[in-house]
Image: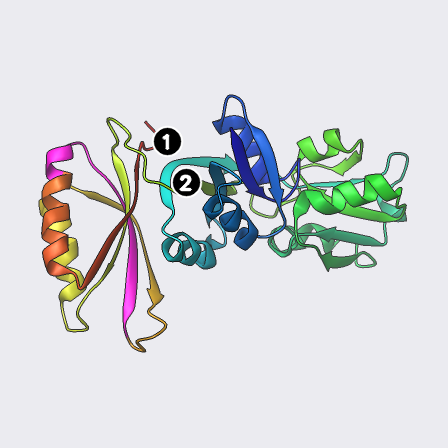
Amino acid sequence: MKVSIQGVKGSFHHLVAANYFSSYELNECSTFDKLVKSIIEKDSEYGVMAIENSIAGSILPNYALIDEYNLSITGEYSLSIDHNLMCLPGQSIDEIDEVHSHPMALLQCTKFFTKYPKIKLIESEDTALFAKKISENKINGVGAIASKEAADIYNLEILNSSIQTIKNNMTRFVIVEKNKKHISNFNKAALKFILDHKRGSLASILNMMSDCKLNLTKIQSLPVIKTPGKYAFFVDITFDSIDNYQKAIKIIELMAQEFKILGEYKDQKL
């Protein structure tokens, strides 16, 4: 079973794959576009994509990719994100001149680096990728921000642990496939719909969901590119009754101009 991730071994996407799948072959992709391509072209059966961070919010381009390429969400996994400063062994933080990591990781650790104004923060495309580069090229005087697992994999020394400003930092990832897979006893769904651009259209559909005893856990809007002023709504819902869910789906199909089920799966919390 081949699983595509954005990033390399030791990245947070890799940690999710390791926790979610019992056995798998890892396919490392430098971008989410390449990850999607690997699934569409059947180089991989599954993909792991970050979709939402408790600090930064929704990762909008990934919603668009899932929708555009008709991928199916078949699972989810929430991971606590712990950022660690690491370098080649035997150095102190006073010897570090540069720290490289993903822009989001750098942003989440800015308060820590106010204590070290001489350190230059430089953006990299992935957290674990620069940890790997430091290890392979034996780069002194340079650090990386990545997971503890990345430090173990690439034999780096952790100078400071948990350096993120907000300690309770969670990212939700979704498991995507090319083809929709029937999952028994699912209790969560990801939906997309486009409504008439008129007053009360969104309120009407949300009231209907409430009447059908659906619990709205997330709502996100994206502009419809070819129609200025119109928006597509992406929602996550949970429910106790499949019958109530199916009733709501039939009503949404009538109320919406466009409607799509992006995925049906089991809520990780249950």
Q: Which residue in the protein does label 2 denote?
A: 177
Q: CA distance from mark 1 to mark 2?
A: 18 Å
Per the image, is 258 magenta? no
Q: Quadrant of residue 25?
A: top right
The number of discs equals 2
Residue 117 % position (x, y): 79, 59
Query: Does residue 210 appear in this view?
Result: no
The magenta span reads 230-244
The foreground one among 179 and 161 is: 179
The residue closer to the viewer here, 71 or 245, is: 71
| Residue in the image at 40% along x and 43% along y | 178
186 or 147, which lies in front? 186
Residue 156 versus residue 33 in the image, above or below: above
Q: Residues within 10 Å of mark 1 (few under 14, many from 20)?
A: few
| Type of the residue with mark 2 | Glu
Residue located 27% across and 72% down the image: 230
| Circle 2: element type | strand
